C-alpha cells in the first residue's frame, strides 16, 4: 500500500451510532407517505388443506377497507417466488404469492387485505372467510420419505426434493482398513432467525414516471429489484429499491417474499402507497427458518486416532416451498462436512425433503454450522471411544500450515490456515490442562464439569461467481467530489455490521483523507450501480475489496494529475494526509484539494486523462476464504435439575487481518450467543399436524442478557492471500464454531453416565433424563459428596 | 368515540383524542411521529418499545394511550434533553456508542431507556444486576456483553458527575 495506514486496524467507534442511539434513524416502518394504506395477509391456520372457497365480501364491506385480493386476482400478474438454486433433478416447488387451491404450511397467505389504517385492517382481516378441507400433513423427515406418505405437492413421485451426492478418494478401502467405525446420529434442529426488526415493506407507484419505489428491510436490494421487476413484469429501470436501516437479518432478509411483490402490485393497482408490517407471529410462521438437518455419520478410524474416511447421510428439511436459496443450503453442509481435518476419503449423500412447514433457507452460517456440528460431535465420539484426549485427536488430524492451499475431498481449496496454532492458543487461554484436573477432582465429589472443544473452518467471502447461483462479485463506485469529500457507493448493504465505519476506514486510508471525509452510500439501487448484497460473511472480504481496488484506480488518477501539475513522475509520488508528496524530495508536494480541483476544472490535465474523479470496480474474488478457530466451552451440569451452567467460554478465531477489531468483537460475541441459543434454548417445534408450537417469543426462547456469561475472545491472524487486505470474514464464525463446543461440553460432563450424545437444545428436561435414564447409571454413577 | 388525553411527552404537552384501543406505542410513533420507539413483538416480550412513563421503564406496546393520560413520558428522542445529558448525548447513549453496545440498533432505544431507569435506581450495579435489569429487552445482534459494558461506562460517568 502506498498510503500510510492510519485507520485500518483500529477499533474506531461506529459512524452509524449517533443516529441510532438517539432514535432518529429510519427503519422501513418509520416511513409514512401521504395517503398510505396498510396491507395485511390472511394466513392459513392449517399445515395442509384444500382451499374450497374464500369469501371476501364481509371484509370488503368493512369500514376503511380498500381492497381484498385472493390468488385468483393475482394469477398471471405476479410470478411465484424465485429460487436461484438449481440442483440436478430437483423437483419443482415454487411458492405462489398467495395460495392457489391448496395451502402447504401454517402461515401461508390466502388473501391480502388493504385498509386505511392498522386497526381497521386487523378488524377486516378477521372477516375474510376461508373454507378449508384439511389434508394430512407431512412433518417428520423419515416418514416423509416413505412410499405411503402423503405428498406435500400433488403428483410428485415422493417428497424427496433432490438427492445430492459427493464422493472423494476411496471410501470403501478406508472403511476396510479401519480399526474401528464410529457412528453417530445427530440432529441440527430447525431454528427461527428472529431478527429484532420484523420484516417491513412500503411500496409507492408514480404513474406519470411509471416508477415503482419499494422500501424493504432487505439484505439484497439489487437482487430484490431485479426479481420484483421479473415477478411483476415491470421494466427494471422503473423499479427503485431502497433499504433504509435494517434491524438485523441473519439471512432471514436475504430473500424475496410474497409481501414485497404484493405491496408493489397493490401500489400500482390502487395508485396509493401501501405498507406492510410483519407481526412477530407472522415472522415466526412465514419468514424463513434455518438448519433442520439430521445426519448419520460414520468415521473410519485407526486405533491411534487417525481418521481414514467418512460417510455422511444428511436429511434436510426444506419445508413446503423453495425460497431464494432453500435447496442450496444443505449442499454447503456437504461441501464443508470434513471440517478442518485431513479426511480424503469420503462420501456424502444429502436428501432434501419437502414437508408442510415454512421453508428453510440461509440462517447465519447457512449449512456450515450443521457441517461443523456434525463433524465436531463425531470427533468427540471418536475421542471418547478411543480414550484419546479430544485436543490430541484434533491435533493429529489437522492438515499442517505447509499443506496450504489445501484441496479437500469435497473439491474446495482451503486458502490458508494454522489450525493447530488456534487450538493451542485456545487450550492455553482456557487453562485446558488445569480444567481437566479440576474436572477429575470434581467428578470424585460427584460434580459434573464438562469441557468441550470445537475446531472449525468456515467458507466465507461468498464467493467466486463460478460457484454462486447468481454472481459472487461485488461493486464499488467512488466519487471524489469537487470539495474533496469522498462518496463511496457499495453494493453490499449492511444491516448492523457497521460497514459505514469499516468501509470508511479503508477508503480514508487508501485516499489519504479523514474518516469523516468519507460517506458510505448503500441500499439505494438508483445510487449504486449494482450489487449482490450482504450475506455469507462476504461484505468486507468482497465488498471491502471492491472499495480497495476502486480506491487504487482513483489514487492512480490523482497521482497522474498531481504529477502533471508538479512536473514529477507519478510513480515517485505518494498520497498521504491530504497531500501528494514526492518520495524523492518530501518538501515537494501538492495538496489533495488542489489536485481534486484540477480534475474538475480540467484545464491542466495530463493528455489522455478524463476530467472528473470517479471510478467503478466490480471485484470478482478468485476463491472463497476459509476462516477457522477453536472454541472451548466449560459447563457444569446440576445432576438434580439437569440445568447446564456455562462457566467459561473461550473463543479463538482467525479471520485474517482485522480492519476494525471493535466490530469484529461485536460479530464474534453476537454469533456465539446465537449459538448458545441453538445449543441450549431454541428449537422450532411443529406438532404432527404441522402446527408451529413455538410460534411466539413466549414459546421460543432466544438468549437474554442473564443467560450468557462473559465471553473471552482472542485471535490468531493468518491473512488470506485471496484478497489484498488479507481479510476473510467473521460474521458467522460464532454460530459455526460455538454450537459443537457447547454440546461437546455437556456430553463430556455426562460421560460418567455413559452418555454418548444428546440432541439440541440441551434443556434441563433432556439433560435430566439423560442422567437419570443413562444405561450405566447404576453401574457407574458417581457418588455425591455431602 | 374518541377519548381525550393530555400528557407530557419529552417535556412537551400533548392533547389528543384517540381511539380507546390505541396502543401507546402507536400513539407515539404514528400520532406524534416519534419513531425512535420500535415495535418488535406487540406482546410485551421483546422490550423494543420501552419508554419511561413517570420515570418507570414501560413496554409501550402493552399500554393503551388512554392509560397514559396525565403521565409524563420520555422516549429515546427526549433523552438528550434530560438533565443527565448535559446538552449532549445522555451518558447511557454515549456508553452505547463508546462500547459498541449496538449493531442493528433496533433494540437500542428500549435497552437505553431500561438502563436509564436502572441507573437512576442503582448507580453502581454489578454485572449480574445489569443483566437482570435488562432481561426484558432482547437483543439478537450483540450478545449483550458490549451492552453491559456500555451501562457500566454510563454508571461510572454519572457517578463521577455527582461527585
Ligand atoms: S414491542 Fe413491546 S415488548 Fe416487543
Ligand atoms: S443491536 Fe440489533 S437487536 Fe440489538
Image (cartoon, coloured by chain):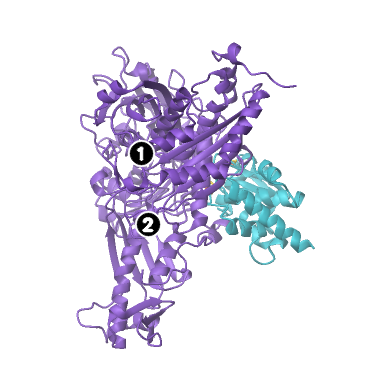
Chain colours: A purple, B cyan
Q: Nearer the viewer, residue A258 or A65?
A: A258
Discs 2, 1 touching: Cβ within 8 Å = no
Outermost residue, right side: B163
Q: Pointer 2: what residue?
A: A726
Q: Earlier in the sequence, mark 2 or mark 1?
A: 1
Distance from mark 1 CB to nearest ligand 1 atom below 8 Å: no
Q: Could you tell whether A427 is left or right of A332 in the image?
A: right
Residue A22 in picture, x, y percent from top left: 58, 58
Residue B126 appears in the rendering: yes
Tag 2 secondary structure: loop
The C terminus of chain A: image quadrant: top right
- Looking at the image, how many numbered discs can be counted on the residues? 2
Label 2, label 1: how far apart the Cα atoms are: 39 Å
Where A34 sits versus A94, above or below?
Answer: below
Where A495 sits versus A439, above or below?
Answer: below
Q: Could you tell whether A166 is left or right of A47 in the image?
A: left
Amino acid at each position: 500500500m502506498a498510503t500510510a495506514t492510519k485507520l485500518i486496524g483500529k477499533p474506531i467507534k461506529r459512524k452509524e451510532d449517533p443516529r441510532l442511539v438517539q432514535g432518529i434513524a429510519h427503519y422501513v416502518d418509520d416511513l409514512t407517505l401521504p395517503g398510505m394504506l396498510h396491507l395485511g395477509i390472511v394466513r392459513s391456520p392449517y399445515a395442509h388443506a384444500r382451499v374450497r372457497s374464500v369469501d371476501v365480501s364481509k371484509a370488503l364491506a368493512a369500514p376503511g377497507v380498500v381492497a381484498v385480493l385472493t390468488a385468483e386476482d393475482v394469477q398471471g400478474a405476479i410470478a411465484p417466488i424465485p429460487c436461484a438454486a438449481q440442483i440436478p433433478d430437483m423437483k419443482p416447488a415454487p411458492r405462489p404469492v398467495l395460495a392457489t387451491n391448496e395451502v402447504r404450511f401454517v402461515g401461508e397467505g390466502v388473501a391480502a387485505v388493504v385498509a386505511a389504517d392498522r386497526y381497521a385492517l386487523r378488524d377486516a382481516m378477521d372477516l375474510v372467510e376461508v373454507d378449508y378441507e384439511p389434508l394430512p400433513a407431512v412433518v417428520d423427515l423419515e416418514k416423509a420419505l416413505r412410499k405411503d406418505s402423503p405428498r406435500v405437492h400433488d403428483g410428485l413421485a415422493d417428497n424427496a426434493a433432490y438427492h445430492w451426492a459427493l464422493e472423494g478418494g476411496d471410501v470403501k478401502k478406508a472403511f476396510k482398513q479401519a480399526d474401528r467405525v464410529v457412528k453417530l446420529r445427530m440432529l441440527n434442529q430447525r431454528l427461527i432467525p428472529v431478527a429484532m426488526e420484523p420484516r417491513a415493506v412500503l411500496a409507492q407507484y408514480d404513474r406519470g414516471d411509471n416508477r415503482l419505489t419499494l422500501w424493504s428491510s432487505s439484505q439484497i436490494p439489487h437482487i430484490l429489484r431485479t426479481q420484483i421487476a421479473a415477478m411483476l413484469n415491470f421494466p427494471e429501470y422503473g423499479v427503485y429499491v431502497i433499504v433504509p436501516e435494517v434491524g438485523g437479518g441473519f439471512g432471514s432478509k436475504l430473500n424475496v417474499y410474497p409481501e414485497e411483490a404484493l405491496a408493489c402490485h397493490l401500489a400500482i393497482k390502487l395508485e396509493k402507497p401501501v405498507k406492510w408490517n410483519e407481526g412477530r407471529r407472522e415472522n415466526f410462521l412465514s419468514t424463513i427458518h434455518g438448519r433442520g438437518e439430521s445426519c448419520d455419520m460414520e468415521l473410519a478410524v485407526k486405533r491411534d486416532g487417525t481418521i481414514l474416511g467418512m460417510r455422511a447421510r444428511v436429511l434436510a428439511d426444506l419445508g413446503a416451498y423453495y425460497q431464494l436459496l432453500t435447496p442450496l443450503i444443505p449442499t454447503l453442509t456437504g461441501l464443508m462436512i470434513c471440517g478442518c481435518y485431513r479426511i480424503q476419503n469420503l462420501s456424502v449423500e444429502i436428501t432434501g425433503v419437502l414437508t408442510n412447514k415454512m421453508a428453510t433457507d440461509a440462517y447465519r452460517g447457512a449449512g456450515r454450522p450443521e457441517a461443523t456440528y456434525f463433524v465436531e460431535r463425531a470427533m468427540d465420539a471418536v475421542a471418547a471411544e478411543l480414550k484419546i484426549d479430544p485436543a490430541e485427536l484434533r491435533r493429529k488430524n489437522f492438515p499442517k500450515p505447509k499443506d496450504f492451499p489445501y484441496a479437500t475431498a469435497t473439491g474446495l481449496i482451503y486458502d490458508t490456515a494454522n489450525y493447530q496454532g488456534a487450538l493451542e492458543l485456545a487450550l492455553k487461554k482456557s487453562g485446558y490442562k488445569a480444567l481437566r484436573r479440576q474436572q477429575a477432582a470434581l467428578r470424585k465429589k460427584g460434580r459434573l464439569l464438562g469441557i468441550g472443544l470445537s475446531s472449525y473452518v468456515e467458507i466465507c467471502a461468498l464467493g467466486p461467481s463460478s460457484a454462486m447461483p447468481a454472481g459472487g462479485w461485488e461493486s464499488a463506485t467512488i466519487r471524489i467530489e469537487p470539495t474533496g469529500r469522498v462518496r463511496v457507493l457499495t453494493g453490499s448493504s449492511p444491516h448492523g455490521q457497521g460497514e459505514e465505519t469499516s468501509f470508511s476506514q479503508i477508503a480514508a486510508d487508501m485516499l489519504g483523507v479523514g474518516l469523516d471525509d468519507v460517506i458510505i452510500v448503500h441500499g439505494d439501487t438508483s445510487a449504486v450501480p449494482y450489487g449482490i448484497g450482504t450475506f455469507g460473511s462476504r461484505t468486507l472480504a468482497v465488498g471491502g475489496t471492491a472499495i480497495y481496488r476502486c480506491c487504487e484506480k482513483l489514487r492512480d488518477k490523482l497521482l497522474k494529475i498531481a504529477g502533471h501539475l508538479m512536473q514529477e513522475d507519478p510513480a515517485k509520488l505518494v498520497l498521504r494526509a491530504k497531500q501528494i508528496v514526492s518520495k524523492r524530495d518530501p518538501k515537494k508536494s501538492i495538496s489533495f484539494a488542489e489536485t481534486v480541483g484540477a480534475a474538475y476544472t480540467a484545464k491542466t490535465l495530463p493528455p489522455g486523462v478524463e476530467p472528473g474523479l470517479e471510478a467503478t470496480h466490480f471485484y470478482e474474488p478468485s476463491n472463497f476464504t476459509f476462516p477457522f478457530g477453536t472454541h472451548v466451552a466449560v459447563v457444569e451440569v446440576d445432576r438434580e435439575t439437569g440445568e447446564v451452567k456455562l462457566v467459561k467460554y473461550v473463543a479463538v478465531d482467525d479471520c485474517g487481518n482485522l480492519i476494525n477489531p471493535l466490530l469484529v468483537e461485536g460479530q464474534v460475541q453476537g454469533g456465539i450467543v446465537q449459538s448458545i441459543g441453538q445449543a441450549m434454548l431454541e428449537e422450532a417445534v411443529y406438532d404432527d399436524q404441522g402446527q408451529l408450537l413455538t410460534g411466539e417469543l413466549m414459546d421460543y426462547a432466544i438468549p437474554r442478557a442473564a443467560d450468557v456469561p462473559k465471553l473471552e475472545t482472542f485471535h490468531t491472524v493468518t491473512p488470506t492471500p485471496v484478497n489484498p487486505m488479507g481479510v476473510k470474514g467473521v460474521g458467522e464464525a460464532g454460530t459455526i464454531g460455538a454450537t459443537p463446543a457447547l454440546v461437546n461440553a455437556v456430553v463430556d460432563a455426562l460421560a460418567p453416565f455413559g452418555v454418548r450424545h444428546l440432541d439440541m437444545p440441551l434443556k434441563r428436561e433432556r439433560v435430566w433424563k439423560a442422567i437419570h435414564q443413562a444405561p450405566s447409571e447404576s453401574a457407574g454413577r458417581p457418588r455425591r459428596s455431602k | 368515540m374518541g377519548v381525550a388525553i393530555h400528557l407530557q411527552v419529552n417535556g412537551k404537552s400533548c392533547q389528543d383524542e384517540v381511539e380507546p384501543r390505541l396502543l401507546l406505542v402507536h400513539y407515539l410513533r404514528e400520532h406524534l411521529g416519534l419513531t425512535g420507539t420500535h415495535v418488535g413483538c406487540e406482546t410485551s416480550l421483546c422490550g423494543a418499545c420501552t419508554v419511561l412513563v413517570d420515570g418507570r421503564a414501560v413496554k409501550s406496546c402493552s399500554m393503551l394511550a388512554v392509560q397514559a393520560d396525565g403521565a409524563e413520558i420520555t422516549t429515546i428522542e427526549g433523552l438528550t434533553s434530560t438533565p443527565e445529558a448535559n446538552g449532549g448525548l445522555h451518558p447511557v447513549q454515549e456508553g452505547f456508542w463508546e462500547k459498541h453496545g449496538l449493531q442493528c440498533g433496533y433494540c437500542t432505544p428500549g435497552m437505553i431507556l431500561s438502563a436509564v431507569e436502572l441507573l437512576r435506581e442503582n448507580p453502581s450495579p454489578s454485572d449480574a444486576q445489569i443483566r437482570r435489569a435488562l432481561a426484558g429487552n432482547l437483543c439478537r445482534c450483540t450478545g449483550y456483553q458490549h451492552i453491559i459494558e456500555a451501562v457500566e461506562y454510563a454508571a461510572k460517568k454519572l457517578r463521577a458527575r455527582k461527585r
